[in-house]
Image (cartoon, rainbow, N blue to C red):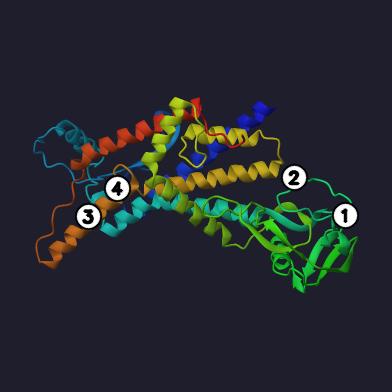
Amino acid sequence: MEILLYAVGIVFMLIGLGLSIGLHEIGHLVPAKLFGVRVGQYMIGFGPRVWSKRIGETEYGVKALPVGGFISMSGMYPASDGKPVRGLFASLVQDARSANDETIAEGSEERVFYRLPVWKRIIVMLGGPVMNLILAIVIFTVLASGIGLQQGTTTIASVNECVLPAGTTQSECEPGDPASPAAEAGVLPGDVLVSIDGTPLDDFAEATAIVQASPGQTLDMVVARDGENLHLSITPITAERALTDAGGQPRLDADGEQVVAEVGYVGMGAQMGFVPQPIGTGATMAGENVARVAELIVQLPVKLWDVGSSLVTGADRDPDGPLSVVGVGRLAGEVASTDAPILNRFVVLLSLLGSLNIALFVFNLIPLLPLDGGHVLVALWDGIRRAWAKLFRRPPPAPVDATRLVPLTVVVAVLLIAMGALLMIADVVNPVNLFQ
């Protein structure tokens, strides 16, 4: 059964990845067609063709390796002028020009990408990453507002009989230990908090905030029990306690140490559950993920060095480090096969898929060919040159011939392949372990 669940997790992530790639390419395809560019192919994956069908002038298909996708637009770059190319990388440049010329069909010379206005070229190239961002926002919105974030609910799960000192190893009450304010007030497990000090409660975090801010003050607490609302008087004591966030996780200071403070304390704990959040929470979560992924990419050389070092030494991988498709699939399998409620596992899988789309969004914005950000940079440079010429009343310059950047593109492609190979090997030999 565990193996079957592991496989289900991998299949879930493969389908999600295929959907993410497909929508990314649709983000390029739709504006390209709207702007009149001839699109010869729309493909999900690389390698041998698994299935394809031609509809109109475009061939739609799926290839064997679901690690990317592409659309083939006519005339990504200006047609070659027939002059021989010289230099160390002449053959590479010439091959790129020849391949580009083949995409320009006879009779469709005006329906080429490079003839589009700069703003239209940018829209076409940003369409793919933006689709991934939109999908991520939808996923995180479903998680946060549809299912809810896991945090303390208003249902009481436990009531401490006594007050134990912070940091003590004592686990049971002993004679002489003072009773907890919650026990003295008559709070019972299963009670549902309705309000404290006249403030209606939606979750346990709100109750905690009121209690912590009210040491020594007697509060009127309303709880629902057996279909009735009961008024209880509760007086929080001053106690040194480790602070937690809304999700019940310890708050840490800048040095990574747990934050301890003197706050009001009553000695009751809440049941954990999924609490729906405001509709804008999903977009906020996506934005936070964008910032984290951007920071990861800035630190990518160091992170990759750490991955290589852990591969050699066998040291534990950084759980916040980069992963390959293999690593993501492996994590999905482990999540699906854990001994946890189905909803909890589904939430983690959706969260992984949302984070994957954020990674696709940010990574594709890197301003290097062959990534989408590189094509945007070429279009911007073309626009700057044209604006400069217009400013000084000069003839419009020839379109930027990005085939001259083929050597740099090859270097970037080789680095990307090497990075992917390193991460795949590491994800097989020394995978990230989130459940240790």
Identity, as a three-letter code, of the amino acid under mark 2: Thr
Kindly report the distance in space between the C-alpha atoms of the residues bearing marks 1 and 4: 71 Å
The dot on residue 169 is 2
Secondary structure under the numbered disc 2 in the rendered image: loop
Mark yes or no: residue 4 visible. yes
In the image, taking residue 269 as reference, residue 9 lies left or right, namely left
Kindly report the distance in space between the C-alpha atoms of the residues bearing marks 4 and 2: 58 Å
Kindly report the distance in space between the C-alpha atoms of the residues bearing marks 1 and 2: 17 Å
Q: In the rendered image, which residue does mark 4 sit on?
A: 374
Residue 203 occupies which quadrant of the picture? Answer: bottom right
Q: Position of residue 10 (x, y in %)?
A: 57, 33
Q: Position of residue 401 (x, y in %)?
A: 18, 46
The dot on residue 381 is 3
Residue 91 occupies which quadrant of the picture? Answer: top left
Q: Is residue 182 above or below residue 362?
A: below
The dot on residue 176 is 1
Quadrant for the N terminus in the image: top right
Kindly report the distance in space between the C-alpha atoms of the residues bearing marks 4 and 3: 11 Å
Identity, as a three-letter code, of the amino acid under mark 3: Trp
Mark yes or no: residue 63 visible. no
The dot on residue 350 is none
1 or 4: tag closer to the N-terminus:
1
* Number of residues whose C-alpha sits closer than 10 Å to that of mark 2, classed few (under 14), some (14–19) or many (20 or more): few
